[in-house]
């Protein structure tokens, strides 16, 4: 029997590669001779870097860069084993998690550090980039990133703008002549799972600004600044990005990456599943096991388990889902190819305890899932059903 394990991380507990190994261990208690094919996956969020690095036999690099409010930070990024692809989570250079609540500064926070990491990866010879852009502390629409890569954002007097989204209200022109020429030879896939435009009531500032500390007055100021930025981008760069779905992701960074890097916005799950070539692992498989931290109604919106199930369904392979917990509406996953779903916890416990024991609990749940599957198969075979 061939079993494909294609699980996401159990967020806050265990990364996908370790969760996969735990599942494999549980399965082998029942089927010691099973052909188990481990293909860790992710949806472009936390853990994407580690997952893609491990499955490609790559390595983790560390760069010292400018953090979201100017202080230097150590940012990890991934060098995939192909020697061509770099994986960068912008949250590690410019993320809200790098700041305490009293440090939030949506007016001045910058994506400059993201540009610095991209530049260092270009120096190292990487020409394909997977950029995960969730968790930002910024609202500068990638202005800092562009400056770090050589673009100049100038006011009416020809002076360079300071960091942050608020300063974009004073933008006079964009000088692209100094933009790193290697960008034209590079390809940027952007993991983006939202459809917000750059500006307006559904835009970056209005929807995501408040969680970064923006007051209503700040939201109005930032939105006006990004409206102006988008107009100057269209005039000087030749890219009309303001209303593109996803342009408002990460404080407008989605639009900035499209404009300055020629990036392509795609669902994170699709990028990862294509990168790991999950479809090629389905050949000859009898069962697929997937999972994530919490399976609920949100899972069906192209989260990794449903992306895995979609590919498995195309090959007629049944899918079992394991998760840390089952939340509201989890049964909707059955309509999207996950035949059965179960939580790994088997007794009352705190979240901290469940996280600490995650590998053990995952292994036990995988074992029981296989035992139930085999019992059901025997029952139906004996009764004549399923023939």
Image: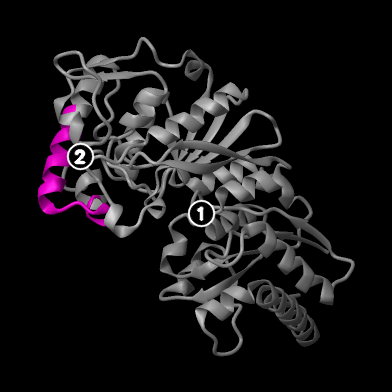
Is 72 displayed left or right of 187 in the figure? left
Q: Disc 1 designates what residue?
A: 46
Is 228 displayed left or right of 352 in the figure? left
* Residue 326 seen by the camera: yes
Is 91 displayed left or right of 122 in the figure? left
Residue reaching furthest bottom? Answer: 348
The local secondary structure at tag 2 comes to loop
The stretch in magenta equals 209-228
What secondary structure is the stretch in magenta mostly built from?
helix
The local secondary structure at tag 1 comes to loop
* Residue 6 seen by the camera: no
Q: Disc 2 designates what residue?
A: 199
Q: Residue at x 62, y 49 (%)?
A: 50
Residue sitting nearer the eye, 177 or 130:
177
Residue reaching furthest top? Answer: 177
Q: Position of residue 251 (x, y in %)?
A: 30, 42
Disc with the residue nearer the chain's start (2 vs 1): 1
């Amino acid at each position: 029997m061939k079993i494909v394990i294609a699980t996401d991380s159990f967020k806050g507990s265990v990364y996908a590669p370790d969760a996969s190994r735990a599942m494999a261990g549980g399965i082998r208690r029942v089927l010691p001779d099973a052909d188990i094919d481990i293909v860790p996956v992710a949806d472009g969020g936390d853990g994407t870097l580690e997952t893609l690095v491990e499955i490609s036999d790559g390595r983790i690099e560390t760069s010292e860069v400018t953090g979201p409010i100017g202080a230097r930070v150590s940012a990890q990024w991934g060098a995939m084993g192909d020697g061509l692809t770099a994986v960068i989570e912008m949250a590690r250079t410019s993320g809200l998690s790098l700041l305490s609540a009293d440090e939030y500064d949506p007016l001045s926070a910058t994506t400059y550090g993201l540009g610095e990491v991209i530049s260092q990866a270009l120096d190292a010879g990487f020409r394909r980039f997977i950029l995960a852009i969730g968790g930002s502390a910024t609202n500068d629409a990638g202005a800092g990133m562009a400056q770090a890569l050589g673009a100049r954002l100038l006011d009416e007097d020809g002076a360079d703008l300071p960091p942050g989204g608020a300063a974009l209200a004073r933008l006079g022109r964009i000088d692209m002549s100094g933009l790193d020429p290697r960008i034209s030879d590079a390809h940027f896939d952007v993991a983006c799972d939202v459809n917000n435009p750059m500006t307006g009531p559904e835009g970056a500032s209005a929807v995501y600004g408040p969680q970064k500390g923006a007051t209503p007055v700040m939201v109005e100021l930032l939105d006006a600044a990004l409206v102006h930025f988008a107009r100057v981008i269209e005039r000087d760069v030749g890219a009309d990005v303001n209303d593109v779905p996803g342009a408002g992701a990460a404080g407008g960074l989605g639009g900035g990456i499209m404009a300055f890097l020629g990036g392509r916005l795609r669902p994170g799950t699709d990028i990862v599943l294509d990168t790991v070539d999950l479809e090629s692992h389905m050949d000859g498989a009898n069962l697929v096991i997937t999972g994530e931290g919490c399976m609920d109604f949100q899972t069906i919106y192209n989260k990794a388990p449903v992306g895995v199930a979609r590919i498995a369904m195309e090959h007629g392979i049944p899918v079992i889902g394991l998760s840390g917990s089952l939340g509201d509406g989890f049964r909707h996953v059955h309509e999207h190819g996950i035949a059965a779903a179960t939580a790994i916890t088997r007794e009352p416990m705190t979240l901290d305890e469940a996280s600490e024991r995650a590998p053990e609990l995952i292994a036990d749940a995988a074992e029981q899932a296989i035992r139930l599957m085999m019992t059901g198969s025997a029952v139906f075979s004996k009764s004549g059903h399923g023939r």
